[in-house]
Image (spheres, grey):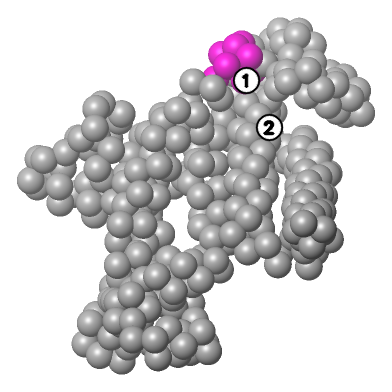
Amino acid sequence: MTKNLIMYTKYVLYYIYINLKFISFLTTRLLTAIPTILGVALLVFLFLHLVPGDPVELMLGDMVPAADREELRRVLGLDLPISVQMANYFGGLLYFDFGTSFFTRRPVLDSLLERLPATLELAVSGLSLALLLAVPLGIFAAKYRDRALDTSAMGFSLIGASIPSFWLGPMLIMFFSLWLGWTPVSGHDGAISLILPTLTLGTALAAILARMIRSSLLEILSEDFIRTARAKGLSENQVLLRHGLRNALLPVLTLLGLQLGSLLGGAVITETIFDWPGVGSLLVESIQKRDIPMVQGCVLLISLIYVAVNTFTDLVYATVDPRIRLAKN
């Protein structure tokens, strides 16, 4: 009885220790994210105010009297010193006020929330396609190493990683939209309009992930526990999927987190090519108009998404492999 009580007490204490380490790991990641976001906001603010060009000139043109320009500059707050504008901007961020667009005169946050669902839709579809292609390609390439299937899979990955999206997108439009007439040229009109942007995003991502899965699997398959699994009489497929793939996916999580952050932040080139109403295309439009508050809001949102996704990736990694959180704390 006493022995069982001691064992139970040890188990409870170890469980508490592991959870405290996890909380410490999470706290460290969150505290690291705060200065990162503030640093991005500061740099974006300074760079936008150092770039040549006057938003008032773009809004009113050259023929408007100087008095009207100065009045608009006063209304927009551009006549204030940079230090005062910076203080107002960061003061607003404390209350989740991203400012007001120079052109639409709408709150920046409202415009971002309107555009974000389209970006999420495109990101999820692109990532889903990438995983559907990359996981089987990586597994087959590792299983049939140095054979024709491996060469074909890695050849596809090399082509996919080498073709830039600003070339692939127009080629897909030319073939499927203009020649065959199967899909819309651009815009966001139903599920069919999602096909070409998804192909553009998913193909490149699948190529990168497939190569990572293959190399990670090959490294895992040379480990001692894989030889032990084979010695127990497990089939090659069981060894590959049950023991190899599970451990091989750990380093892939890091790459997947970075790529997902990029997708959720707005695939700028893809959204611009297909006139997709997401955060990426909004950023490009705002830069062209010198809409400073909107550009700041877009970049800040993208940085927030990057930090959130990578923090979540770290947590998943630490959950799957407890050695991570125990080693870093």
Judged from this view, the residue extending furthest toward the front is 1
Quadrant the N terminus occupies = bottom right
Judged from this view, the residue extending furthest toward the left is 180
Q: In the image, residue 169 lies at what x, y percent?
A: 30, 51
Tell me which amino acid carries mark 1. Val
Circle 1 residue: 108
User: 255 or 251, which lies in front?
Assistant: 251
Q: Is residue 32 visible in the rendered structure shown here?
A: no
User: 317 or 74, which lies in front?
Assistant: 317
Asked whether, in this view, residue 321 is left or right of residue 142, the answer is right
103 in magenta: yes
Tell me which amino acid carries mark 2. Gln
Question: Number of numbered discs present?
Answer: 2
Circle 2 residue: 296
Q: CA distance from mark 2 to mark 1?
A: 9 Å
Residue 167 against residue 156 in the figure, above or below: above
Residue drawn at 42 percent across, 42 percent down: 123
| Secondary structure state at the residue bearing disc 1 | helix
Residue drawn at 23 percent across, 82 percent down: 149
Residue drawn at 46 percent across, 88 percent down: 228
Magenta stretch in the rendered image: 102-111
Q: In the image, residue 126 lies at what x, y percent?
A: 36, 48
